[in-house]
Image (cartoon, helix red, strand yellow):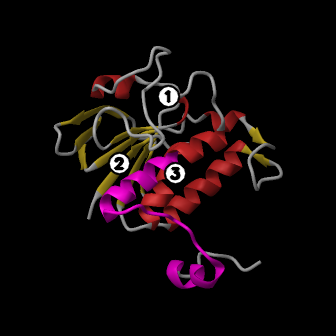
């Protein structure tokens, strides 16, 4: 089974984690809880009328946990190295191997720079619509790929785009994650609440 390591547990990182774990990839998230969402209140996120940013993060974390994401809360990643055949993600305590890495560290681009990812003239990490960087199988999401266009819903979309591209690579064909009410309960074992 392919392994996905996500550095950052805000909307981008947890969105990527939800999609990859939900679709059978072993997914690990490292999160220092430095997300800007703790300073936010969402009125402009589709489907949400009004929610405190910290409450929103608690919901995202619970969703990740429900789908089997291995979360390392409070664990800082100190380095990411790629050798062309996967990645080693280093923390103070241990090293972790991964087939794919998703960088979701907000505006902090240090790990992307040390990994050798190309940057744009504006200083953002250079990615296409799939969120893949110039380093194969390494993805960058959210504020690190946008100059001053930081928004939770955009970041979550970036994380989903990265995850779908990873799943497309793994499945060998374009992958779409689309659930229907008729199959959701059967597939996800009662995680879906009846309306």
> Which numbered circle lies on residue 160?
3
Mark in front: 2 vs 1: 1
Q: In the rendered structure, which disc, 1 or 3, sits on the residue that comes first in sequence?
A: 1
> Which numbered circle lies on residue 71?
none
Please name the residue shown 63% across and 48% down the image: 57
Q: Quadrant of the C terminus?
A: bottom right
Q: Position of residue 25 (x, y in %)?
A: 35, 63
Nearer the observer, 141 or 10: 141
Q: Which residue is mark 2?
A: 5
- Whether residue 104 sits left or right of residue 3 in the image: it is right
Q: In the rendered structure, which disc, 3 or 2, sits on the residue that comes first in sequence?
A: 2
Predominant secondary structure, magenta span: helix
Nearer the observer, 131 or 86: 131
- Residue 11 in sight: no
Q: Which residues are magenta?
A: 159-188
> Which numbered circle lies on residue 144?
1
Please name the residue shown 44% across and 40% down the image: 131
Residue 149, quarter of picture: top right
Q: Quadrant of the N terminus?
A: bottom left
Alpha carbon separation for disc pair 2 and 1? 17 Å
- Is 181 part of what is drawn in magenta? yes
Please name the residue shown 51% across and 65% down the image: 177
- Residue 163 in sight: yes
């Amino acid at each position: 089974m392919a392994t996905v390591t996500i550095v950052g547990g805000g909307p981008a990182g947890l969105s990527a984690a939800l999609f990859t774990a939900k679709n059978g990839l072993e997914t690990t998230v490292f999160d220092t809880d430095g997300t800007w969402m703790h300073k936010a209140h969402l009125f402009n996120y589709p489907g949400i009328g009004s929610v405190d940013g910290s409450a929103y993060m608690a919901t995202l974390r619970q969703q990740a946990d429900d789908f089997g994401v291995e979360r390392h809360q409070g664990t800082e990643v100190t380095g990411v190295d790629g050798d062309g055949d996967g990645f080693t993600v280093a923390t103070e305590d241990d090293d972790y191997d991964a087939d794919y890495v998703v960088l979701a560290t907000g505006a902090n681009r240090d790990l992307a720079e040390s990994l050798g990812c190309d940057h744009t003239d504006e200083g953002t990490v250079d990615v296409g619509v799939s969120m893949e960087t110039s380093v194969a199988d390494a993805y960058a999401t959210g504020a690190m790929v946008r100059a001053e266009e930081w928004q939770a819903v955009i970041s979550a979309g970036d994380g989903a785009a990265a995850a779908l591209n990873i799943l497309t690579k793994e499945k060998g064909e374009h992958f779409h994650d689309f659930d229907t009410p008729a199959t959701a309960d059967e597939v996800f074992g009662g995680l879906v609440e009846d309306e």
